[in-house]
Image (cartoon, rainbow, N blue to C red):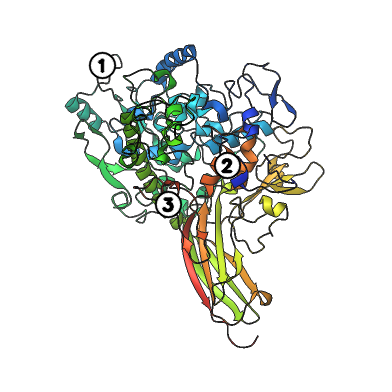
Amino acid sequence: MVWSFVGAGRTVSWAGLVPADNKGSAMEQRIVSPGRLSRHRRVMSVGIGVLAVAWGGPGLFGPAVSPARAADVEPDLQDIADRAHEQLLLGERFPSATTCAACHPKHYREWSVSQHAYAQMSPIFNAMHGRILQLTNGTNGDFCIRCHTPVGMILKEPEFMSNIDRHPTSREGVTCIVCHRVNKAYGKISGRLAIVEGDLTQTIYGPSGDNTALDDAIADVGLVTDPNRGGLQVHGRIDKFFQITTSAQCGTCHDVTLVNGFRLEEAFSEFKSSPASRKGISCQDCHMGMDPGRILAERSDPEFDRKNYDFGPAATVRGYDTPARKLTNHMFVGPDYSVLTPALFPLHRLIKEESEKDDVSADGYTIREWLRFKWKAGWGTDDFEDKVPDDYIDTAWDESDTDRPAQYRWQEPWDSPDDRYDAREVIQENLVLLKDMEQQRLRLLQNGYKLSDVVTERADPGGIRFRVQVSSGTDGHNVPTGFDAERLVWLFVQVMDADGTVVMQSGDLDPNGDLRDLHSLYVHNHELPLDSQLFSLQSRFVVRMVRGGEREQVLAVNYSPSPLPFLRPERRSSVLLGRPGGARKHKQGIEPNGHRWAQYSVKKKQMTGPGPYRAVIQLKAAMVPVNLINEIRRVGFDYNLSARDVAQVLVHGHVIDTGDEFQRVIWNPDSELPADNQVVGHQVLWEREVIFDVTGDE
């Protein structure tokens, strides 16, 4: 195996980075958690030598199994019993979103596919968080993860461990109680929340505090508010929490400043100084209304709520609907998408814990069992099941049987056709929901970005020169915003001659799926040229070297040979410099209601003769660059994923130039082909075509 490092002698594309039959790289398999080693100093094997790291406390990296391997490890019976007892008690302190779904199915369905539900499930986030912990010698602590799983950090779970073994409510990330069990205004504290603990019957907090509909439902349906009584339990009271309807509620997490003054994310700060804020528009108005990223009426309109928000029952239980009222959309649509199997995300109620594995009264399957379900092979579909040989229909595979075809190698519980059909229903429901989110995500991005004017400055036999305007479609914050140093929004431009031959191209991808910028391994190793005309809105992390000078890098952690690589407060006030001394962010985004111009040219030597010449201009967006996966893969990925697995999903769906036409990957609910059902990947937001009539003399 050849690994592709920055500065390596050659570059290997992600297609060849990890062998097809290897579900975790050699390096990922060798990384093990410190577990119960000395609390003062632990040693981690990283595949190349031994790195001695001083950790911040015991259990930092959790159980003695790395996330990359946790999916393959079955816990022992005593561990299962202990965890079952523990989760029973913890469930009374922090109820799961699945308990809320019984009365709030619409809210739960929206939330289950949301960025909030994915916040902690994301294997990319977990690997990045673990890599930053590694690079900072553990001194970053829970700074990143406490926004992604506030419940997990309150429970004092290890900062770095497999999600498979986290408490179910912790795994839900920004779950219901993270917003509706908070009754204090904390300000911008990067997710350090004191969630009000208690069982399902305890008070929740909302925008109005009106208990009329709740009291009527309790009386009419016979709901239970006594934790000691059987029946369908619900919260007994709703209290008003003023902050939940304001943008300050979002600013609790969506404004991230490290202890050294480094401003990682500034969405809330950008909003506070925006035209939208001055008009009284809140984050919720744009991002929880009917059209993601856009309000549908002026804020001063007396009918604003009716025009901007959906209306309907807030609760539906046992055939009883509460009176119609304003409903906020809990999809929280954003630019990210899941790289997980649809068996695990969107979150659903048929995921049970290892402690419930042998409990026949518990519905569903464990995460480890779901990971063994081959949904892309067609399990649980009539077309597949009708072709299963009689000898294999309900017979578990014995690993010694090497003659059995791979598509029929199932083990308990998937040796049962009924279980395969049940699982397939979940897959299909989740694919429909993922498709809905994909369309909503496209709508959000189209609301946020506009492909405006294309101005031709020159078009003659001596060359072509033109410029393209990209505009912000929002007055609420910069675009991109948030984690903008890993957000990809760029222009893809191709100019073709009269015969269709490409004479100029910018914004195309290298074999890894990266843009040809300074972070492309192919560009770094001089195997592909730098895209000198690239227009990208991705901000850049810039760090100061130990002996002076600065450099761009993927993560904002300086890996220069410094005697003190760990995160620490600055010795000088960042007010004096406007930034911390060790690192800064070079922002490339567009301000609210602003625009940028991209310049392009075709030189005379690139021209092939008389026109017409045709330019295809596409404004494209993606979640994160593949080079981030290269940067964080050293700690492994959760759910037994390899770097190759993650990278392939990241770049899936982008427009492919076949030479004759552009082929877009589509979603087909009746197909089991991976290309038809992976509803993720790059998206084309807008597309324009321009004709240059090149005639006459130079």
Q: Is residue 281 above or below residue 124?
A: below
Q: Quadrant of residue 16?
A: top right
Residue identified by numbered label 3: 293
Dot 1 corresponds to which residue? 230
Element assignment for label 2: helix
498 versus 270 height, above or below: below
Residue closest to the eye, 618 or 239: 618
Disc 3 element: loop
Residue in the picture at 52% in, 62% down: 658
Q: What separation in Å lies between label 3 and label 2 (alpha carbons)?
A: 33 Å
Name, please, the residue furthest toward the left. Answer: 220
Give the total of numbered labels: 3
* Residue 394 showing in the rendered view: yes
Residue to which mark 2 is pinned? 644
At label 3, the amino acid type is Gly
Label 2 Cα crowd, 10 Å radius (few <14 / some 14-19 / many 20+): many
Q: Position of residue 154 (x, y in %)?
A: 50, 23
Residue type of the residue flagged with mark 1: Gly
> Is residue 265 rendered to the left or right of residue 475?
right
